[in-house]
Amino acid sequence: MVSTFGSGDGVNRNGLLITASEGTPVRAIHAGRVVFADWMRGFGNLLIIDHGDDIMSLYAHVQRFNVGVGDRVGNDQVIAAVGNTGGRPSPGLYFEVRRGGEPIDPRTWISKR
């Protein structure tokens, strides 16, 4: 883990930045529906899943998407591959969880699952 919630730089302050080899499968942390899968400044290729109950998860800097907007995904389903898009100097995954649009510590939310 390169940075934790609140300790990263810029957009990476609101989640976890994890180093991984390029092409490593990225899995959904919980079932939901893909609401965004496109490039976004600062995040590179960004995937957002709506899990209901006002919870969304974000997966950024990915190399490619395995799912598209509107797709339903299952818990632990492969949704993308780790990359270095969006200005990353090396491959990694940025992961964020939001409740009601506000970032929350992903480790706290994951531990409840």
Image (cartoon, rainbow, N blue to C red):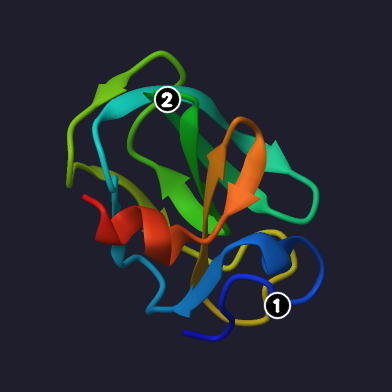
Which corner quadrant of the image does residue 89 belong to?
bottom right
- Where is residue 11? Give x, y as percent: 76, 60
Q: Could you give the CA–CA distance between mark 1 and mark 2, rounded to whole angstroms? A: 26 Å
Residue 61 position (above or below residue 38): below
Residue 3 position (above or below residue 47): below
Amino acid type for the residue under numbered disc 1: Gly
- Where is residue 63? Give x, y as percent: 48, 56
Q: Residue at x 56, y 77 (%)?
A: 4
- Where is residue 107? Give x, y as percent: 40, 66
Which one is in front in this view, the residue at disc 1 or the one at disc 2? 1
Q: Is mark 1 in CB contact (under 8 Å) with mark 2?
A: no
Q: Residue at x 58, y 63 (%)?
A: 15
Tell me the number on the disc at residue 8: 1
Q: Nearer the viewer, residue 1 or 62?
A: 1
Residue underneath mark 2: 34
- Where is residue 87? Give x, y as percent: 75, 68
